[in-house]
Image: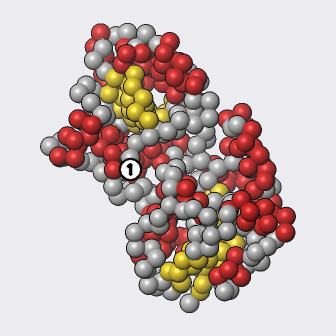
């Protein structure tokens, strides 16, 4: 039996980003399925959100529940190489980092890289994010890691081209889609409650994700404004759901300038339980992001039976293929025409829904966990 230490510190803040989803889903599968390893969960921090239910009691898990302030631990690990995580765990065979948070260890280490957007598109990030990335020294960590997991071929190519990592040291293992995302019957009481909660009484186009320039929501607002100029779409709403990110003010300003501003609504952060209902109630999901290392949201929408329009940039063509209508994110007119074509062509809409169901079958957490455990071995 191998002893694998997993760095789960990033779950301590209780956020709901893609990296936290990746960590919770993958570790949950490890604890549920694997009988040949013991998993020691490094959960450090002065204040931490509760662990997912059942993790601490799992037969093959131990929690290293230390209370060192993470900023102190990071500085010490970065400049002193101390304390080594295996010393805190009483030894170990390997370390798995679901993200490149700085960590002191002499054990073989596997690190997952989700993307290198902070290198290829620095203008998408605030100065404090650049400071954090510099401090974490992701380039050095990538070069020292025993093996690297990239969540897409696109991310792998960035690791090779931007960080000089040898391709044979990188394994592409796709993430999965949570089973909570599924087609829900129209008469489901939870769906009705969600419609009432968010006052969803008209057909709507949905965007779900962080509100920030990288997601290109301004182009979606402009395309929606063009769509609303057509009489047959005057009853539609644009629902923008998700937390505010860096430079979110420009998105709100664009909405305020729109002639369709009275039909554009920002819901803010949405609870996990509501996300599947929001997808199910939508007429169309649009995700015109400039950069994605993977792209959970288009797949979640597909699993819920919603046609998807997405950007033809970075990893999205790889993940979606022909199961979504892909557009140039810089071309507002093209996005507008794509939205209109989904609503006017029933055959296209039916194709996208069916192709979406088939596409999402490729992405399961069971498969991701199995491939990751194989890499550990």
Left or right of 210 in this view: 100: right
- Report the residue that reaches farthest toward the left: 187
Left/right of residue 359 with respect to residue 38 in the rendered view: left
**In the visual, does 192 lie left or right of 320?**
left
Residue 274 quadrant: top left
| Picture coordinates of residue 159, whole percent (x, y) | 72, 53
Q: Residue 284 location in percent, x, y? A: 35, 32
In the depicted structure, whether residue 147 falls above or below residue 319: below
- The chosen color scheme is secondary structure
Q: Considering only vertical position in the picture, is 197 above or below 329?
A: below
Quadrant where the image shows the N terminus? bottom right
Percent x, y of residue 89: 64, 82
Residue 175 visible in the picture: no
Q: Does 253 appear above or below 50?
A: above
From the top left corner, tell me how far across and down residue 205 is, in percent: 36, 29
**Residue to which mark 1 is pinned:** 272
Query: Would you say 237 lies left or right of 251 here?
Result: left
Residue 61 seen by the camera: yes
Compare residues 349 and 53 and report the one nearer the observer.
53
Locate the C terminus and report the quarter of the image it occupies: bottom right
Residue sitting at x 42%, y 15%: 261
Which is more toward the observer, 242 or 298?
242
Q: Secondary structure at mark 1?
A: helix
């Amino acid at each position: 039996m191998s002893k694998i230490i997993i760095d789960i510190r990033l779950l301590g803040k209780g956020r709901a980003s893609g990296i936290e989803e990746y960590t919770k889903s993958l570790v949950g599968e490890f604890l549920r399925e694997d009988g040949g390893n013991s998993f020691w969960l490094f959960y450090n921090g002065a204040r931490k959100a509760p662990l997912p239910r059942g993790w601490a009691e799992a037969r093959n898990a131990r929690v290293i529940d230390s209370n060192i302030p993470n900023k102190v631990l990071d500085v010490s690990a970065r400049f002193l190489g101390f304390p080594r995580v295996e010393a805190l765990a009483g030894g170990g065979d390997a370390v798995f980092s679901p993200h490149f948070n700085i960590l002191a260890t002499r054990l073989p280490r596997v690190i997952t890289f989700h993307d290198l957007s902070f290198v290829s598109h620095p203008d998408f990030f605030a100065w404090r994010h650049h400071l954090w990335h510099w401090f974490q020294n992701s380039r050095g960590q990538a070069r020292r890691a025993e093996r690297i997991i990239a969540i897409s071929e696109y991310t792998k190519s960035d690791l090779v081209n931007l960080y000089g990592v040898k391709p044979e040291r990188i394994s592409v293992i796709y993430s999965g889609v949570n089973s909570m995302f599924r087609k829900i019957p129209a008469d489901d009481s939870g769906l009705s409650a969600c419609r009432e909660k968010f006052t969803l009484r008209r057909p709507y186009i949905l965007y779900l994700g962080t509100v920030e320039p990288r997601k290109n929501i301004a182009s979606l607002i402009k395309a929606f404004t063009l769509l609303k100029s057509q009489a047959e779409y005057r009853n539609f709403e644009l629902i923008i759901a998700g937390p505010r990110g860096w430079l979110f003010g420009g998105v709100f300003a664009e909405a305020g300038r729109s002639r369709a501003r009275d039909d554009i609504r920002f819901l803010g952060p949405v609870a996990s339980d509501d996300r599947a209902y929001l997808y199910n109630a939508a007429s169309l999901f649009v995700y015109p992001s400039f950069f994605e290392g993977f792209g959970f949201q288009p797949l979640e929408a597909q699993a819920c039976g919603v046609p998807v329009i997405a950007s033809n940039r970075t990893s999205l063509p790889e993940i979606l293929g022909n199961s979504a209508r892909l557009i140039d994110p810089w071309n507002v007119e093209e996005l507008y025409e794509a939205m209109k074509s989904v609503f006017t062509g029933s055959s296209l809409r039916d194709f996208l829904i069916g192709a979406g169901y088939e596409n999402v079958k490729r992405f399961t957490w069971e498969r991701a966990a199995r491939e990751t455990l194989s890499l550990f071995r």
